[in-house]
Image: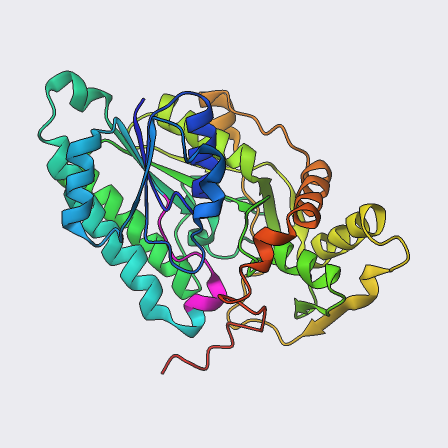
Amino acid sequence: MRALVTGGAGFIGSALVRALAKNGVPVACLDALTYAGNRENLSEISEMPDFELLEADIRDVAAVGNLLRAFRPTVVFHLAAETHVDRSIDDPARSFETNIVGTYALLSEVTAFWRTLNDAEAEEFRYLQVSTDEVFGSAGANEDFVESTRYAPNSPYAASKASADYLVRTWAMAFGLPVLIGHGANTYGPYQFPEKLIPLMTLNAIEGRNLPIYGDGTQVRDWIHVDDHVAGLRAIAERGQVGESYIVSARNPLTNLDVVRGVCQALDAIGDADVDHAELIEHVADRPAHDQRYVSDPIKIESELDWHPTVSFQEGLVRTVTWYLENTDWWEQTRDRYDRIRLGLGQAAQ
């Protein structure tokens, strides 16, 4: 395998890049290094001979085309995206530009490159679209998402990712590009930018700030540790059937309130023992169009690709909280890009 990873300096992307590089896979990372991208996420592999990082936007077709021809990947993992629902509510156009227009530009260049390959190389080649369970909308009380669940996105972010998925399917049908799609559950772990729930609550609690929970906090999300998510993406790329999609879930549905309480309990145990961090929990106005429930059934990837999660939520949460406690320098340098104020009130969109 020779892997090109777009968005490879972000949270999930950098975990994938690190895992591939440490397993001897030559990796090229393409990242625009926007607010959530960080070279420090790749520092431990930056000197490896079979790793390279190109700072470029996926909409820069010249840069993408040159990288494809020079590096000659056998698989493209497409993770470059605007990923935060709140930011998509405040600035929908940014999500659409990156997630839809960017995916179109990447698909066009990848297809042009794929057509230059000989028969054996073309047969081996794969394009993996890293999607989300949010494209399915909100699950019913007794419903679990499966790969055939109808798309019903409810946020600009989810709509942009759904649109990107449709583009990928179109490129497979119209142009024959060998594609795969992975629908990841809510992912957590080290190096996650602190706009997302678990790092935001962790860092606020460390500093004694309030822990804002949208609405009553009963919204359910399906959680997976980033190491398990990355292993799932590798299984799809290596063993998945071309044209198929796979849900990557660890079967950990929890309410937002329970997750935040878990963060507090972890900090009580391994942080400042004299502080009851749960006292910092504060309920605030709910997010517009807030999906109530995401729960996914990963039976397809488990049975067909023999992939299974290995990190329990309790273990993963303790490991994650510990990482943030021990890596103050990493998250301190994010302050100039995000001061942890409330986003996503929808007042910017007209």
List the single residue furthest toward the top: 120
Q: Does 171 appear above or below 56?
A: above
Q: Is residue 245 magenta?
A: no
Q: Is residue 87 magenta?
A: yes
List the single residue furthest toward the front: 47
Name the quadrant of the C terminus.
bottom left
Can see residue 220?
Answer: no
Q: Does 72 appear above or below 321?
A: above
Q: Does 1 appear above or below 90?
A: above
Can see residue 168?
Answer: yes
Image spot of residue 135 (x, y percent): 42, 53
Q: Nearer the viewer, residue 110 or 254?
A: 110
Image spot of residue 317 (x, y percent): 69, 43
Point 25% across, 26% down: residue: 74
Point 46% across, 77% down: residue: 346
Q: Which residues are magenta?
A: 79-88
Image spot of residue 320 (x, y percent): 66, 44
For residue 273, side relative to residue 169 (left or right)? right
